[in-house]
Image (cartoon, coloured by chain):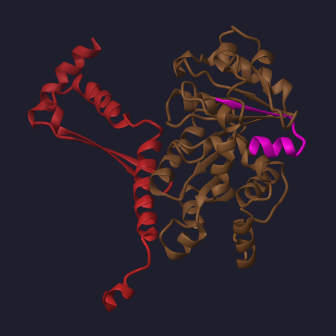
């Protein structure tokens, strides 16, 4: 049965789009049929992170309004044939999304794919609430920093009250992905520790994504980090997250890209 | 740099944690006041209207408190009215029934 996963956070700039692309690609790499959906109407960026910005013809609004059929708007990934993108509109605003339209499109997506990964806009208003509305699973993306943790708490409250599942009296599966984590800073006492964030938000941890240049590199070239460099630290963390989402038990670790001195000298010379 | 520098707790993350725990406890309580931030105001208005049918009370003499405890919350209603308000109230109440 298809699963709808919403990537959300409340606060902007914490890594929702990066996480959507990385999880979507890693799920597809694991053999699942995946569609990543951009709900950030007016400020779309998932197309850019996926490297499909020049292939957008129709978007989510065109489909919800009935101006285009779903297959016309879906963009199939050039690297993974079982990965598709449904882009957001860049010219319309969030009010152009109707509740009924979104419900119908989510239903159609459920018939075609195993996983539908929705990238939520920042904030707690209509756009964010529509992105989470039909979710079975939610991934809350949080930075180890006070404003991000506070906003995540708000979002968790909304997940428990404003989703179809919550309204039916069912629970919604919630997971935390801690992004931009720096173990050295946390050890020095300059950054919230993993346990601090977990204690405050009290939802289960799905992954710890270390702060890494690889995330920036992947976005520069328009490729999900898990595809661009599957062996780098953030990719390993995202790939473990996907295994956990699929029900595997994987020990939690904070992957690191720390290189030996010889390795460093070698890569510098090679560059 | 003095000896005191070494005695101070390391880093600022413990401050962050404490501030977050405090503000979130407050915000969660506000949110979960049966999920309605305006609950107190609604209760106050409706209770006042019921009482005003029978006795005359001044709006600022009505205090409504909602206290949250472990598992149970208590609603305290404190209404102050003048001595002669009750004696006057009887015929008024009869009229209301009739």
A83 left or right, relative to B47:
right
A79 left or right, relative to B41:
right
Quarter containing the N terminus of chain A: top right
Which residue of the protein is positioned furthest toward the bottom in this rendering?
B3
Q: Quadrant of residue B94?
A: top left
- Colour used to depict chain B in the structure image: red
Residue A158 lies, in percent from the top left, at 55, 38
Quarter containing the C terminus of chain A: bottom right
Q: Quadrant of residue A33?
A: top right
Residue A237 lies, in percent from the top left, at 73, 58
Residue A86 located within the stretch drawn in magenta:
no
In front of the other: A240 or A154:
A240
Residue A29 located within the stretch drawn in magenta:
yes
* Residue in view at x 57 percent, y 25 percent: A41
* Residue in view at x 69 percent, y 42 percent: A221
Q: Is residue A217 above or below residue A91?
A: below
Specify start and end residues of the magenta stretch as a single range: A23-38
* Residue in view at x 72 percent, y 30 percent: A52
Give the tally of numbered discs. Answer: 0
Which residue of the protein is positioned furthest toward the right in this rendering?
A31
Residue B43 lies, in percent from the top left, at 34, 33
B6 left or right, relative to A80:
left
Which residue of the protein is positioned furthest toward the top in this rendering?
A67
* Residue in view at x 72 percent, y 68 percent: A269
Q: Is residue A4 above or below residue A217?
A: above
- Colour used to depict chain A in the structure image: brown
Can you see residue A259? Answer: no
In front of the other: B91 or A22:
A22
Can you see residue A211? Answer: yes
């Amino acid at each position: 049965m298809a699963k709808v996963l919403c990537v959300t956070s409340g606060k902007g700039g914490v890594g929702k789009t990066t996480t959507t692309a990385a999880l979507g690609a890693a799920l597809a790499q694991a053999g699942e049929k995946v569609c990543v959906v951009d709900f950030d109407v007016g400020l779309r960026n998932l197309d850019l992170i996926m490297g499909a910005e020049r292939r957008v013809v129709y978007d989510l609004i065109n489909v919800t309004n009935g101006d285009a059929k779903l297959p016309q708007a879906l963009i199939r990934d050039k690297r993974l044939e079982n990965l598709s993108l449904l882009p957001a509109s860049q010219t319309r605003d969030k009010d152009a999304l109707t509740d009924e339209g979104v419900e119908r499109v989510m239903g159609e997506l459920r018939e075609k794919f195993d996983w539908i990964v929705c990238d939520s806009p920042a904030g707690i208003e209509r756009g964010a609430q529509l992105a989470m509305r039909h979710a079975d699973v939610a991934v809350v993306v949080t930075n180890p920093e006070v404003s991000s943790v506070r906003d995540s708490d708000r979002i968790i409250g909304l997940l428990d009250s404003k989703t179809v599942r919550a309204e039916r009296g069912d629970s919604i599966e919630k997971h935390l992905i801690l992004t931009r984590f720096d173990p050295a800073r946390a050890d020095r006492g300059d950054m919230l520790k993993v346990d601090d964030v977990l204690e405050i938000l009290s939802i289960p941890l799905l992954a710890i994504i270390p702060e890494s240049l690889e995330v920036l590199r992947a976005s520069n070239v328009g490729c999900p980090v898990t595809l661009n460099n599957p062996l780098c630290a953030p990719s390993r963390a995202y790939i473990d997250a996907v295994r956990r989402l699929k029900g595997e038990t994987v020990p939690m670790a904070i992957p690191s890209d720390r290189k030996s001195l010889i390795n460093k000298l070698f890569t510098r010379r090679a560059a | 740099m003095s000896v005191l520098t070494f005695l101070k707790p390391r880093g600022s993350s413990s401050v962050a944690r404490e501030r977050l725990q405090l503000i979130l406890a407050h915000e969660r309580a506000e949110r979960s006041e049966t999920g309605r931030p305006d609950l107190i105001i609604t209760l106050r208005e409706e209770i006042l209207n019921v009482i005003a049918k029978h006795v005359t009370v001044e709006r600022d003499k009505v205090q409504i408190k909602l206290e949250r405890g472990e598992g149970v919350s208590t609603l305290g209603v404190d209404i102050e009215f003048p001595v002669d308000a009750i004696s006057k109230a009887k015929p008024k109440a009869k009229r209301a029934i009739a």
